[in-house]
Image (spheres, helix red, strand yellow):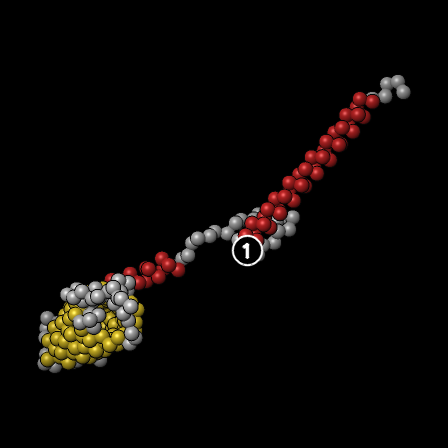
């Protein structure tokens, strides 16, 4: 038919075929993307909904454990600042205390210790203690270059001074020690009663807990290497 726009019709047909092909390729690409999401979810053991509508998929973070830095922070705090609670003159006082020790004996079970306590109050705020202690190791351990772990019960006593008077004290401690022949790391809880010799002032009962780090036995060399 004269004047009929054959070229226009042919152009529309080619455009329709091209658009259909483009939509097919787009759908195929989306299917491939979702399949890769499912595969990634399987690799990361993550249960996600990978329906075609879910296009906001984020891979989970790996390799980060918040427990370790938190534990190190807590251990550092209790090593630097060991809390102490005092009962004196029918009153309760709070403070911080720090103990260092020098051991001798096979595994440093016998220890000489020095402890300083600062009490949050206006009088007798500084307490000094020099004592002797013996660690009863509650499980069998062998000489090693590595730290040995064992439960420990400690009995001891010593002398007390607060710059206003002096006294003597027995104490008992329980904890779980990490030690070899040179180093002692001792998380513990400790109870103590101090008999004071200073006129009308009362005796002192105190309770503390924390981490003590000291030298186990720097004076002897254990035979670490064993032959059998």
Residue 68 on image: x %, y %: 37, 59
Callout 1 secondary element: loop
Residue 10 on image: x %, y %: 79, 25
Residue 105 on image: x %, y %: 17, 71
Report whether residue 120 is seen.
Answer: no
Number of on-image labels: 1
Pick whichever, 190 or 221, lies toward us: 221
Residue drawn at point x = 72 percent, y = 35 percent: 21
Q: Which residue is mark 1?
A: 46
Determine whether 54 is above or below 10 in the image. Answer: below
Dividing the picture into quadrants, the one containing residue 101 is bottom left
Quadrant location of the N terminus in the rendered image: top right
Looking at the image, which residue sits at the far right? 1
Pick whichever, 143 or 219, lies toward us: 143
Dividing the picture into quadrants, the one containing residue 204 is bottom left
For label 1, the crowd category at 10 Å Cα-Cα, with few meaning under 14, some 14 to 19 and many 20 or more, is: few
Report whether residue 31 is seen.
Answer: yes
Determine whether 35 is above or below 124 in the image. Answer: above
Determine whether 61 is above or below 112 in the image. Answer: above
Residue drawn at point x = 88 percent, y = 18 percent: 2
Quadrant location of the C terminus in the rendered image: bottom left
Pick whichever, 99 or 32, lies toward us: 32
Looking at the image, which residue sits at the far top? 2
Residue 6 on image: x %, y %: 83, 22
Dividing the picture into quadrants, the one containing residue 137 is bottom left
């Amino acid at each position: 038919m004269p004047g009929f726009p054959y070229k226009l019709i042919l152009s529309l047909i080619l455009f329709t075929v091209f658009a259909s092909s483009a939509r097919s390729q787009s759908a195929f690409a989306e299917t491939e993307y979702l399949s890769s999401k499912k595969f990634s979810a399987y690799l990361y053991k993550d249960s996600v909904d990978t329906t075609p509508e879910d296009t906001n998929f984020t891979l989970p973070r790996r390799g980060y454990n918040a427990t370790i830095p938190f534990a190190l922070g807590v251990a550092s705090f209790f090593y630097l600042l060991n809390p102490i609670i005092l009962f004196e003159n029918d009153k309760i006082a709070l403070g911080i205390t720090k103990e260092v020790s020098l051991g001798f004996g096979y595994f440093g079970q016998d220890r000489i210790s020095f402890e300083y306590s600062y009490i949050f109050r206006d009088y007798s705020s500084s307490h000094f203690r020099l004592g002797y202690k013996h660690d009863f190791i509650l499980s069998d351990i062998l000489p090693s270059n590595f730290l040995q772990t064992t439960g420990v019960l400690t009995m001891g006593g010593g002398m007390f001074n607060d710059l206003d008077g002096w006294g003597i004290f027995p104490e008992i401690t329980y904890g779980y020690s990490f030690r070899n022949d040179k180093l002692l790391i001792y998380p513990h809880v400790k109870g103590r009663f101090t008999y004071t010799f200073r006129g009308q002032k009362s005796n002192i009962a105190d309770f503390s807990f924390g981490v003590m780090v000291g030298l186990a036995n720097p004076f002897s060399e254990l035979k670490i290497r064993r032959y059998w």
